[in-house]
Amino acid sequence: YGQLIIMVVYLPIFALGGVEGRMFHPMALTVVMALLGAMLLSVTFVPAAVAMAVTGKVQEQDNRLMAGARRGYARVLDAALGHPPLVLVSAGVCIALSGLMAMRMGSEFIPSLDEGDVALHAMRIPGTSLTQAVQMQQALERTLLQQPEVARVFSKIGTAEVATDPMPPNVADTFIMFRPRDEWPDPGRRTAEVTAELQALAARLPGNNYEFTQPIQMRFNELISGVRADLAVKVFGDDMAVMEATAEEIARVLRGVAGAADVKVEQTTGLSMLTLDIDRSRIARLGLSLADVQQTVGTALAGREAGVVFQGDRRFDLIVRLPESIRSDLDALKRLPLKLPSGAHVQLGEVASFDLRPGANQVSRENGKRRVVVTANVRGRDVGSLVAEAQGLLAQRVKVPAGYWTQWGGSFEQLQSATERLKVVVPAALALVAMLLFAMFGNVRDGLLVFTGVPFALTGGIAALWLRGIPLSISAGVGFIALSGVAVLNGLVMLSFIRKLRDGGVPLDQAVRDGALARLRPVLMTALVASLGFVPMALATGTGAEVQRPLATVVIGGILSSTALTLLVLPMLYRWAHRHGT
């Protein structure tokens, strides 16, 4: 039953989808397969090996460490059994405090990795020529190399015509590689501090907007949410001008939120467009149609097929249009002749007015609807608390017009999706565990007593996260899931032995005390083996340790609290629950 309960506890991890599912499915599958293998060996190989290797009577002996632990535990257990109200109130206060701590803790999707390098996404005015973009990029690289911690800088301007990664010449990715830490002027400085100084250096150069992130994190954000920043507020609607104005209001509010950095509005305008306002009444009096004027302008500016040129077995369309010097000269375009039905000519400037105004640079769509995105990176704060504060401020200060709506994206969207899925699957798995306990003990009362180990375990996990300053995340959630099985197993071991003593006719008080003392070693061994295995993960400092640290911290803290409370509270609860029994 114990192995089956642990396997059931891991079922919610298989319900995770997307990035979090790809990260934790292998771990859950490994645990389940290992448990199945252990169960198979325990009923086949182990009995045969014991029969062959163990002969004669086996004497159980305690070492000095275990004997001392049992004497100390006996004194603490007697004190706890002698003061039930105090112990129960203390346990209830611990659970309540952990609940308050969980409500005040921040949240994030997956902890950010410290990759050791920085990626910079540079955005310039739409229409910037490739030559000018290269010059601006070279100036940026020279400026960034002034930072003593930087070893080298290289960039990529635009991309090839790859559908999965479109990027015009006015956009560039810059990768900043740091020196080894022992070569830094101050090896104890955090990467975030150096990044802030790099941001200040880059801000000196005009004509650029920047987003500072990390190479893997930038691609990770883009793959899961379509934007390269940590956070995105998407404005949906029809009128680009209204969407742009709403996005600018949202950006102004986000810039005032602590922890929001690199707040930018997607560049949807800024490309100069030549607009012709044709005087329809005048061209009608002259005998021209709107199509006649548009055809002439289109031929002059865009070109028109005039024939075909053959070169061997190859053919090329012959396109005629005005030379570049005339097409870029507004006065020359105004003198463009239009042929009238009478055979006379009139200049284009006499029947149309020219206006050079900023136009749309790009029109982004998502699920068939136009959108404008406000992006921001999160620094020095968790995503959950930042979004909660920002949502409150946006509700007060930004009025979204009717027919338009906003949607939060980025890592927060993934956090919401995973959280909503776990809200359904985790209770279902715990309910299944409770049913297995009821089936094993044959009554609801003892099953509920063992199940009390779950809130005791959650208490320690939350306290451990709070002490280390780690926010709640999907990694921590997976730790809580794994912890629940171990917590239930500890209670199962102790309660089963107490019931065995009771079935043998031992009085209630003696059975509770003797059973708790007899199961001290199995409970401690289970707790030590499970917790010590996670110590390297909890203390790791290398790349990728940020994802493992919350999981390990939760398991270690939860096992410690669950073991302590199981050894003290569970015997007392059993005695209270069976005080009127036989």
Image (cartoon, grey):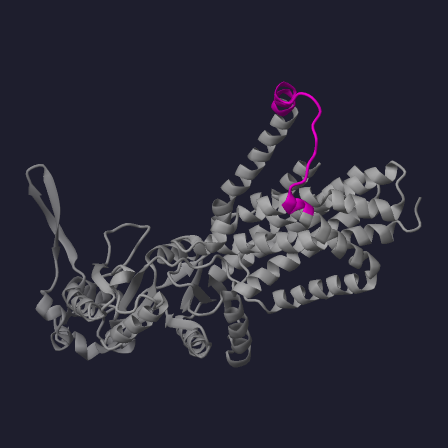
> Would residue 350 be found to the left or right of residue 187 on screen?
left
Tell me the magenta residue range: 45-67
Q: Is residue 298 magenta?
A: no
Residue 330: x, y in percent? 15, 76
Residue 333: x, y in percent? 14, 73
Q: Quadrant where the N terminus lies?
A: top right
Q: Quadrant where the C terminus lies?
A: top right
Q: How many marks?
A: 0
Residue visible at 78% across and 58% down in the picture: 80
Residue 77: x, y in percent? 77, 54
In the displayed structure, would residue 485 be above or below residue 291? above
In the rendered image, is residue 99 in sight? yes
> Would residue 102 be found to the left or right of residue 227 on screen?
right
Residue 74: x, y in percent? 75, 52
> Would residue 512 be found to the left or right of residue 409 on screen?
right
In the rendered image, is residue 442 in sight? no
Residue visible at 82% across and 37% down in the picture: 500
Residue farthest toward the top in the current orientation of the protein: 52
Quadrant of the rendered structure where residue 5 is? top right
Q: Nearer the viewer, residue 465 or 211?
A: 465
Quadrant of the rendered structure where residue 8 is? top right
